[in-house]
Image (cartoon, rainbow, N blue to C red):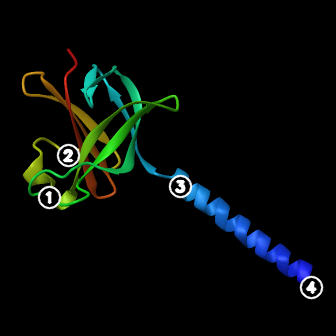
């Protein structure tokens, strides 16, 4: 009886440990894949043209004046399992997007890439689950 009890406790501890390990590893959420047609500067470093998986991290960026905490976080641009760059993303609910961004909204679950201000900036706009994720890059020189 004592042995069965100890085996049960051991199994429970293993279950908790493995679920904690899974939680510790899932610190990013995929926002989908995007294709950049030209290189940009991400966090001050070059990010080459190409296809990337965009992952939202739990790392919060310092909010701009008037923004709520959590409205800006970091995203990672991943190719073949390696992070190639990261940049700050502004998270805007669907209800507020018309006040923030111009142009047609991407379809739900989709994205669009726009060149802005005389080819000086590139915006990646991802529309996912009721939120809009806006990433602004200086164009690469």
User: For the residues carrying marks 4 and 2, which lies nearer the camera in this image?
Assistant: 4
For residue 110, side relative to residue 98 (left or right) = right
For residue 102, side relative to residue 59 (left or right) = left
Mark 3 or mark 4: name the one nearer the start of the chain. 4
- Judged from the image, the secondary structure of the residue bearing numbered disc 2 is loop
Q: From the top left corner, tell me how far across and down residue 71 is, in percent.
A: 23, 55
For residue 116, side relative to residue 50 (left or right) = left
The residue sitting at 9% across, 57% down in the picture is: 66
Mark 3 or mark 2: name the one nearer the start of the chain. 3
Give the residue furthest to the top.
141
Q: From the top left corner, tell me how far across and down residue 23 is, in percent.
A: 54, 58
Mark 2 or mark 1: name the one nearer the start of the chain. 1
Q: Quadrant of the C terminus?
A: top left
Q: Determine the CA span between mark 2 and mark 1.
A: 12 Å
The residue sitting at 28% across, 20% down in the picture is: 39
Mark 1 or mark 3: name the one nearer the start of the chain. 3
Give the residue furthest to the bottom.
1
> Which image quarter: residue 33?
top left
- Judged from the image, the secondary structure of the residue bearing numbered disc 4 is loop
Residue indicated by mark 1:
96
Residue indicated by mark 2:
105
Q: Determine the CA span between mark 4 and mark 2.
A: 64 Å
Residue 47 badge: none
Residue indicated by mark 4:
1
Callout 4 crowding tier (Cα within 10 Å): few <14, some 14–19, many ≥20: few
Vertical relation: 3 (above or below) 14: below
Q: Quadrant of the N terminus?
A: bottom right
Q: From the top left corner, tell me how far across and down residue 140 is, in percent.
A: 22, 19
Q: Determine the CA span between mark 1 and mark 3.
A: 32 Å
Residue 24 badge: 3
């Amino acid at each position: 009886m004592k042995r069965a009890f100890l085996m049960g406790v051991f199994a429970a501890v293993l279950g908790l440990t493995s679920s904690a390990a899974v939680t510790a590893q899932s610190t990013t959420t995929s926002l989908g894949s995007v294709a950049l047609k030209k290189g940009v500067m991400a966090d001050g470093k070059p990010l080459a043209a190409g296809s990337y998986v965009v992952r939202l991290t739990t790392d919060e960026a310092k909010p701009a004046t008037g923004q709520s905490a959590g409205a800006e976080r970091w995203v990672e641009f991943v190719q073949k399992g390696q992070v190639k760059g990261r940049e700050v993303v502004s998270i805007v609910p669907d209800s507020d997007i018309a006040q923030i961004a111009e142009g047609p909204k991407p379809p739900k679950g989709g994205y669009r890439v726009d060149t802005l201000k005389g080819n000086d900036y590139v915006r990646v706009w991802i529309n996912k689950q009721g939120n809009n994720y806006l990433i602004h890059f200086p164009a690469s020189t």
